[in-house]
Structure formats: C-alpha cells, structure tokens
Amino acid sequence: MKLVIVVSVVLSAMALAMRARAEDLLYLVRHPGAALRALLSMYVVVPMMALATIWLVQPPPATQLALLVLSLSPVPPLLPKKQLKSGGEGAYIIALLMSAAVISLVLMPLTLPLVGRLFGREFPVSTSGIARTLAVTILAPMLLGLVAQRLLGPRAERASHLISRVGFFLLLIGAAGALLILVPKLWLAVGGGTLLAMSLVIVAGLASGYLLGGPYRSTRAALALASATRHPGVAMGVIGSSFPDAKLALLAVLIFVLLNVIVGIPFVKMSRANG
C-alpha cells in the first residue's frame, strides 16, 4: 500500500508541473513579502499551535508525536489540486510547494531532535532520508513534468489531467488499503482528545494562512490550505525511521489526513463561492 500511495503522489506532482511554467518556481523570490508571510504561517504559527494544543488538550503520545512531525513537514504534492479548486493562483501554489520542500529539508533535522527530548528519547533525523523522500515525491516528478510539457506542447494539458486522475485513483486505493490494515488499532488512536487536538491545529492553520495570505483571495486560500495540510509520506517516513515501534503515530498521521479532507471541503466550497 505504501508503494501505491507513493506512486499516486509522484503522478500528482508530475501532472501539476505539466500545467506549470518554469518562471512560476521563482514567484516567491520576486515577492519577498509573500514569502515571509508564508514562512511565518507554515513554519512558525502552525508548529507553535501544535505545541500549544498538546499542552492544553494532552492527547495520547502517538498523537503528540504525529502533530509535531506533521507541523514541520512540507506541503504534499496532492494539495495544489485542492488549492486550485479554491481559487488559488497557479504560480503562487507551485512556489509554495517547492519552497516548503526546501525549508523542511533544513528545518526538520534542526528542530526534530527537540521533539525527541520532549518524548524523552533520541530522535535521529536523516537529512539524506528526508532529501530522498522530497526528491522522489516532489522535485524529480516536477522536473519530469516540466520536460514532458516541453515535449508534448499543446497536448500536455490533456495528458496532465489524465495523469492526475490516475494518481487520485491510486491514492484512494492506497489510503483505503492502509486503513483496512490498521483499522484494528483505529479506536486506540482516535480517543483521548486526538480528534479535538487535530481539529484545532487544522483550523488554526487555515486561519493563519488566510490572514497572512496577503490582499488577494487567491493567495489567502492557497496559503490557508498549505498551512493546514502537510506531507504524510515525509511525516510517516521520519516517524517510521526514528520511532519504529510507534505504530499508533503512523495511524495518527492517516487520521490527520482524513480529518484534513473533511475540514477542508467546506473551506474550499466557501472560497469558491466567495470568488
């Protein structure tokens, strides 16, 4: 199931790049104010909210670990599809995806050892492992997508939609399979304030991103979704390598993703309605 999910993420990233322009990648470089607000929302407000929620709600240790790792993870390549539906600007969305991957590569090895201290144990984080995950799921597919766009020309748009649909279908299969495997332990992961803690972090991410997204509705909606949603593959990879016995934390990551979809649907609809 893990391979199916990885393939779906790769296809989604490639499909996005096939509809992008090379200059889109430099959007935040040309707009430093937008870049600073995005950094503040995604990597200051959300991690601080995760810490505050853990302190206030006191969810199970597995949920605490999942929330802290997720708050420092990059944006998933599946997210831009939701952002575009909410009215997000294409160049801004792609720039968020790429810059978040680079920032997470730097931040996670520096900050996650502190997370380990909170849990009373070593938290070795492999920079090369994180880089490999980001390269496989984001960087390489997007480069391939840009190359395919050049080769296919006008046909790239139609091909990207087909690839995107296949990726989404595989994601549904992979997520359903993973839940079936872990469902016997599901009740252990959702109790003890888990759903409340996750909901608070998600709503805080949506609110901070919307407030810090600048004067345009398109960038506000995009940053809101980017702040609330994180890359489950990176989070599960870090947890799996550093806490091999933390099976409930892996399940907590999946629960966070599902809850994010549930909370995000009305936000996307409201964003489109207000457009």
Image (cartoon, rainbow, N blue to C red):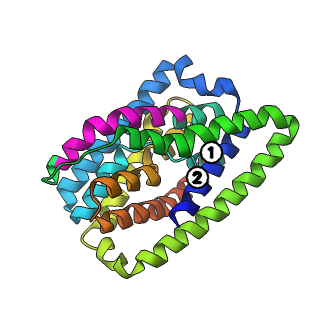
Q: Splitting the image into 4 quarters, where does residue 248 fall?
A: bottom left
Give the main secondary structure, helix, strand or loop, of the magenta stretch.
helix
The span from disc 1 to disc 2 (Cα, nearest Å) is 6 Å
**Disc on res. 13:** 1
The boundaries of the magenta stretch are 98-116
At x 33% / y 42%, what residue is drawn?
Answer: 126
Residues under numbered marks 1 and 2 in contact, where contact means CB atoms less than 8 Å apart: yes
Amino acid tagged 1: Ala
Q: Is residue 68 left or right of residue 22?
A: left
At x 60% / y 69%, what residue is drawn?
Answer: 173
- Residue lying at the far left in this picture: please name it: 120
Q: Is residue 89 visible?
A: no
Query: Image quadrant for the C terminus?
Result: top right
Amino acid tagged 2: Val
**Disc on res. 9:** 2
Mark 1, secondary structure of its residue: helix
Q: Splitting the image into 4 quarters, where does residue 165 fall?
A: bottom right
Task: Count neighbours of disc 1 (C-alpha within 10 A) and say few if under 14, some if 14 to 19, many if 20 or more.
Answer: many
